[in-house]
Amino acid sequence: MVWVKEIGTRGGSDGGWRDDFPLDHDLPKSIEVDCGRLRLPIHPMFAVRLRVFVDWHRDQERDVVVTPPTDPATREVFEGMQIDPGGGSVLEDDAIMPVTRLNEFREVEEVAEQTREILEYQLPDVSPLGEATFMAISELCGNAIDHGRNSLGAYAAVRRITQPRRQVSIAISDLGIGVPEHIRQRYPEWSDDGWAIAHATEDRVTGTDDPHRGIGFSAVLEAALTTSLHAARMDLLSASGFCRVQMAQEKRKVEVFPAARFRRGTWITYDLISV
């Protein structure tokens, strides 16, 4: 028996949240993900979510086959983002950082610095976003490794998007305890997952007693305020909560929604829109 997942033409858009990629122990031993119909755009979160799905099931000793897009331009981005680690790759100019698996803080700092150098020295149209991108990767990936320890580690991807406006989009994930459960270690009264995530983005809020922690989300948002941006948006999905934080004209707007379905771990997208 083969479990088949077919991805539609727009499966990689809308922030990369469209399709469900179940991390289910009861799936059969053979899995096929058919991306043949997929068309651009491909958000980095789609790339991260599919890569995590593939790695997790292969780690469970399942045979996972990924059919790449038939459209040449889409296939170039698909392979350039290294969504299927066994599917080969090509040079893709806008893949600032293809999907990368991180297990140690040293690796986080290395990829954060490499990403900043690419932005600041190779991509003049989005070079002002280099520092904010560096901060996002350093802080958010560091949090993922620190709080989300699991056998697969953390994942991150960064891509430049030019239409409709110039922006840098970042996707980060881990399959650890998740933001709500982590933050409730210290604030058990925050029972709603979405609002627990929203509180976690506030300055100095942490799930530990360490006074030096709790600066990850707030530091990233502060970087957005002090960078030459048109706007910034951070989406956080964890457990049964979804929180969106938007920064525009030095104002912060927080929205909380119920997640469409429970999600293991923590999933973050960070879109930096250039002036």
Image (cartoon, rainbow, N blue to C red):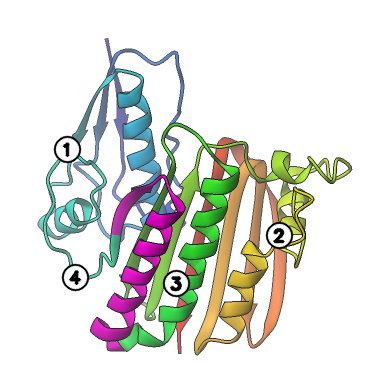
- Please identify, in this view, whether the residue under mark 1 or under mark 3 is nearer the observer: 3
Please tell me which residue lies in front, 19 or 104.
Answer: 104
Neighbor class of circle 2 (other Cα within 10 Å; few <14, some 14-19, many 20+) is many
Residue at image mark 3: 134
**Which sits earlier in the primary sequence, circle 2 or circle 4?**
4
Using a 10 Å C-alpha cutoff, classify the residue at mark 4 as few (fewer than 14 neighbours), some (14 to 19) or many (20 or more). few
Instruction: In this rendered view, identify the residue nearer to me: 220 or 254.
Output: 220
Magenta residues (range):
98-124
Question: Which quadrant holds the C terminus?
Answer: bottom left
> Which mark is nearer the camera, 4 or 3?
3
Q: Which amino acid type is shown beneath numbered disc 4?
A: Asp
> Do labels 1 and 4 touch, CB within 8 Å?
no
Evaluate if marks 4 and 3 touch, with contact meaning CB atoms under 8 Å apart. Answer: no
Q: Is residue 165 left or right of residue 84?
A: right
Q: Quadrant of residue 244?
A: bottom right
Q: Give the amino acid type for the residue marked by disc 3 in the picture.
A: Phe
Residue that label 4 marks: 93
The residue sitting at 49% across, 64% down in the picture is: 138
**Nearer mark to the viewer, of 2 and 4:** 2
Q: Which badge, 1 or 3, is on the more N-terminal residue?
A: 1
